[in-house]
Image (cartoon, helix red, strand yellow):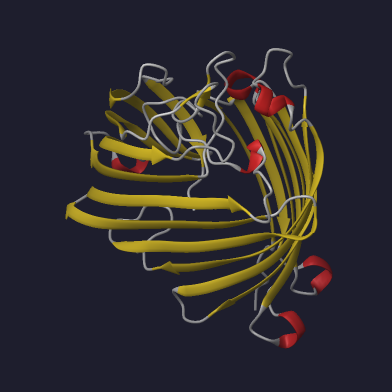
């Protein structure tokens, strides 16, 4: 019997059209002190965001087919370009997860975090200035996932669905209920040619008369709607031009990936896509000071997808053909990241 290595170390660099240069590294030990527990530490730095995450997971909690774990996190985010403020959160999550079948799994979790909205510009929207400061969020939630893809990295057939809910207000300063869902279907058209359809949506509303804070709202653009900047779609302050987010959103996309004549082992594919989306108003919407339209936004584009040793890198060129005059569009997008 030969022992397998239980440790792993990863390092990666990249560049995103919104986050700028990125560097990430992580270390994982899948059998810490011979207990079978998994411990991990991950760090990510970019020009816009910094993340620290520590996780500990027991895959067979108390000897049952039940995973239990705790995650500690610290994130800072510079949103000055889109909404004239910066954001920091620090906290932890306690989670339990189990499989109903090989494809169906569920996780329940409790999160306690402290959020801080700071570095608010002097000419920021009044609704953002009023939210400056620190709040505590106490939240329970669950994630239900059904995954029938033939591969998590490069799927060609099958489908993926997820449904998540969160309830904040078990103590703390923030009270809301949130629902999110994702559905993706993959079709194998020909050898190495894959067509996919995707739909995403979410809704969040305040409870007990509590207005939503800007960091809890949805923002549409960049990864969620190609052809537009992050926060480029949705309500916008007339004076400061700040993106204000929305209480709900829905998006749909269709994409075709195909070989472009390079050796398959290089992992480089071409793609054609179209994205469309809608986003709702913020709960404190005021037509006198804010611009908003519920019209559909949409874009078409082409690009290159590279399954590199550092993760999936996307080069996208888009044209937004359905937009408002005050929307912020983006023709070129480069993104470095990992899929789910």
Picture coordinates of residue 305, whole percent (x, y): 36, 36
Q: Residue at x 68, y 12 (%)?
A: 123
Visible in this render: residue 144? yes
Q: Residue at x 70, y 24 (%)?
A: 85
Which residue lies at the image location 70% right of the left edge and 46% below the top edge? 26
Image-based side of 9 in relation to 320, left or right:
right
Residue drawn at point x = 23 percent, y = 33 percent: 260
**Is residue 46 at least partly visible in the picture?**
no
Number of numbered discs visible in the structure rendering: 0
Q: Residue furthest front?
A: 288
Work out whether residue 86 or residue 134 is closer to the camera in this orientation and state it. 134
Q: Residue furthest bottom?
A: 63
- The quadrant in which residue 268 appears is top left
Find the residue positioned furthest to the left: 190
Which x, y percent locates residue 267?
36, 40
Relative placement, left or right, of 294 versus 216 is left
Q: Nearer the viewer, residue 59 or 32?
A: 59
> Which percent across, then down, holds residue 286?
54, 29
Q: Can you say which quadrant of the picture contains the N terminus?
A: bottom right
> In terms of depth relative to the viewer, which is nearer, 82 or 210?
210
């Amino acid at each position: 019997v030969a022992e397998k290595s239980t440790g792993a170390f990863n390092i990666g660099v990249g560049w995103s059209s919104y986050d700028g240069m990125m560097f990430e590294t992580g270390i994982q030990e899948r059998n810490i002190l011979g207990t079978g527990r998994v411990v991990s530490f991950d760090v990510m730095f970019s020009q816009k965001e910094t993340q620290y995450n520590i996780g500990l997971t027991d895959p067979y909690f108390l000897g049952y087919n039940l995973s239990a774990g705790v995650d500690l996190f610290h994130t800072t985010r510079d949103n000055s370009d889109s909404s004239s403020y910066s954001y920091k959160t620090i906290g932890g999550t306690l989670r339990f997860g189990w499989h109903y079948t090989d494809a169906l799994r569920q996780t329940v979790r409790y999160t306690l975090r402290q959020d801080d909205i700071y570095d608010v510009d002097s000419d920021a929207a009044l609704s953002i200035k009023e939210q400056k400061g620190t709040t505590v969020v106490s939240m329970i939630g669950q994630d239900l996932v059904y995954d029938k893809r033939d591969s998590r990295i490069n799927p060609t057939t099958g489908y993926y669905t997820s449904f998540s809910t969160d309830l904040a207000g078990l103590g703390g300063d923030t009270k809301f209920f949130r629902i999110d869902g994702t559905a993706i279907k993959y079709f194998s058209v020909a050898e190495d040619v894959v067509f996919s359809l995707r739909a995403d949506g979410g809704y969040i509303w305040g409870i007990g008369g509590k207005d939503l804070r800007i960091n809890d709202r949805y923002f549409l653009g960049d990864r969620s709607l190609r052809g537009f900047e992050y926060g480029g779609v949705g309500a916008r302050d007339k004076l400061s031009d700040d993106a204000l987010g929305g209480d709900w959103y829905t998006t749909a996309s269709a994409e075709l990936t195909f070989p472009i004549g390079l050796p398959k082992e290089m992992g480089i594919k071409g793609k054609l896509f179209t994205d469309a989306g809608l986003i709702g108003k913020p709960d404190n919407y005021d037509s006198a000071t804010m611009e908003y339209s519920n019209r559909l936004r949409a874009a078409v584009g082409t690009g290159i997808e590279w399954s590199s040793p550092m993760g999936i890198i996307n080069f996208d060129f888009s044209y937004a053909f359905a937009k408002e005059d005050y929307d912020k569009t983006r023709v070129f997008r480069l993104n470095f990241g990992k899929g789910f």
